[in-house]
């Protein structure tokens, strides 16, 4: 993900490696080249999802645009793997630090 805008880097990291988000990692919901993330479409789809899925989506949206509020204490509800992915995504977004590839 080197070379990507930092707003995309953390967001895409979550969509690529988080099993809860991975099936939405496609052009129905994002157009990286055009700088478009279909926020309203994603919110609509996630209305009925689990609490953990909503947390990961909310973090991805927050990292992408900063307009969506995110409570760090929500990370307490995530399992160890998703917590690690969340912190990696935040590092990518705010520090430009390269992280290892997520476990598949």
Image (cartoon, grey):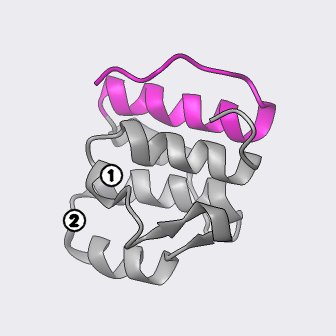
| Image position, residue 44 (x, y; %) | 33, 82
From the image, state whether disc 2 or disc 1 is nearer to you. 1
For the stretch drawn in magenta, what is the main secondary structure? helix
From the image, which quarter does the N terminus lie in? top right
Q: Residue at x 40, y 54 (%)?
A: 55
Q: Is residue 97 magenta?
A: yes
> Where is residue 64 drawn, in percent x and y?
64, 59
Q: Where is residue 80 in the image (x, y as percent from the top left)?
A: 34, 23
Q: Is mark 2 on a helix, strand or loop?
A: loop
Q: Does the magenta stretch include residue 59?
A: no
Against 31, is 38 above or below?
below
Residue 36 seen by the camera = yes
Image x and y of residue 97, in percent: 73, 23
Image quadrant assignment for residue 67: bottom right
Q: Mark 2 points at which residue?
A: 49
The foreground one among 77 and 38 is: 38
């Amino acid at each position: 993900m080197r070379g990507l805008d930092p707003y995309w880097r953390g967001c895409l990291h979550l969509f690529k490696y988080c099993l809860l988000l991975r099936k939405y990692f496609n052009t129905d919901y994002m157009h990286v080249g055009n700088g478009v993330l279909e926020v309203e479409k994603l919110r609509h789809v996630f209305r009925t999802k689990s609490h953990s899925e909503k947390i990961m989506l909310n973090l991805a949206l927050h990292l992408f645009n900063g307009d969506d509020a995110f409570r760090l204490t929500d990370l307490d509800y995530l399992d160890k793997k998703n917590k690690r992915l969340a912190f990696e995504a935040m590092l990518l977004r705010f520090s430009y630090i390269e992280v290892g590839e997520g476990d598949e």
